[in-house]
Image (cartoon, helix red, strand yellow):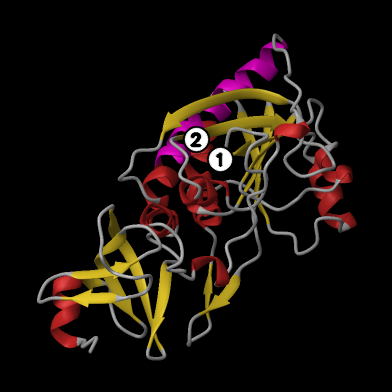
Amino acid sequence: MNIIFMGTPDFAVPSLQRIFNSEHKLVAVVTAPDKERGRGQKISYTPIKEFALKNNIPLLQPVRLKDQEFIKSLTILSPDLFVVVAFRILPREVFSIPKYGSFNLHASLLPKYRGAAPIQWAIINGDHETGVTTFALEDKVDTGNIFIQKKIEISDKDNFGDIHDKLSILGADVVAETIGLINSGNYKLLNQDDFLASPAPKITKESGLIRWNKTADEINNLVRGLSPYPGAYFIYKNKLIKVYQSSANKDSKLSPGEISAGKNELTIGCISGSLNVIEVQLEGKKKMHVSEFLRGFNFS
């Protein structure tokens, strides 16, 4: 089949790699436009563009997905299938171009966690499993009929980075399997039950604020769900302190927000239990173990 791949971040690279190494023809890659980043405003490419350039794959970087020149460019390539992994919301005039339509890889067990941040919210909410889903694209985001779902466990030690990487690799397997199903024509789609749907909205700065009137487990899940980025945080004397690793202590005599700082240990009270802080970062500084942090920061 002639396949066009659409994606942007690191998460999508293993899926692109699998298609590139397959029997199918990767006729083009679509990714986000270049951006100026940092103080020097250096131009940065998406990881997907880097892969495409390295492997001499034709590349499209539309600013507007409804641009007629972009749509014409896609149509000329006579694609059989669009594979979408962590890209933008495609309009119907785009996703309906290929002979066999378009499918998306989503990092949750749909219809659970429809939205931009499914991995983060699964961990923040204390789920013990998650997975990936491939589904046929429809007008409404993340609502299409399902091809394949596969699950993994979320351990108490897993953070966002851990699950992101596991699902990225698992997702590549599921993408390859889905392409095989479509190519064979021997598959049956499963309808999503909208009544079981839950949202996974974009992570904002406000999402990361630690509120000590929650339980130690809830706060520890927030830390795990936002590590290694963007990081959960609290404010102390107008200083923003991010927490990247912690553990929940069920027994505590500390009141919510009360801090106990020793030579090598930092414990903060919650509504139930307390949080043992392990890895932190003071704004403008590097990440460090709490023992190193406490040598230069006084909580008194």
Count of numbered labels shown in the rendering: 2
**Badge number at residue 52:** none
Residue 183: in magenta span = yes
Q: Is there a contact, CB below 8 Å, between mark 1 and mark 2?
A: yes
Place residue 31 in its image quadrant: bottom right
- Most prominent secondary structure in the magenta stretch? helix
Q: Position of residue 293 (x, y in %)?
A: 20, 78
Q: Residue furthest left?
A: 263
Quarter of the image with the C terminus in it: bottom left
The residue carrying pointer 2 sits among few (fewer than 14), some (14 to 19) or many (20 or more) residues within 10 Å by Cα, namely many
Q: Residue at x 68, y 11 (%)?
A: 184
- Tell me: 162 left or right of 186: left
Place residue 198 in its image quadrant: top right
Q: Which residues are magenta?
A: 166-185
The residue carrying pointer 1 sits among few (fewer than 14), some (14 to 19) or many (20 or more) residues within 10 Å by Cα, namely many
Quarter of the image with the N terminus in it: top right
- 271 relative to 92, above or below: below
Q: Position of residue 207 (x, y in %)?
A: 55, 66
Please, what secondary structure does the residue beneath circle 1 have? loop
- Tell me: 203 left or right of 252: right
Q: Nearer the viewer, residue 251 or 62?
A: 251
Q: Earlier in the sequence, mark 1 or mark 2?
A: 1
Q: CA distance from mark 1 to mark 2?
A: 8 Å
Q: Residue at x 57, y 29 (%)?
A: 175
Q: Position of residue 258 (x, y in %)?
A: 32, 76
- 185 relative to 82, above or below: above
**Residue under pointer 1:** 107
Q: Nearer the viewer, residue 90 or 132?
A: 132
**Residue under pointer 2:** 130
Q: Nearer the viewer, residue 160 or 94?
A: 160
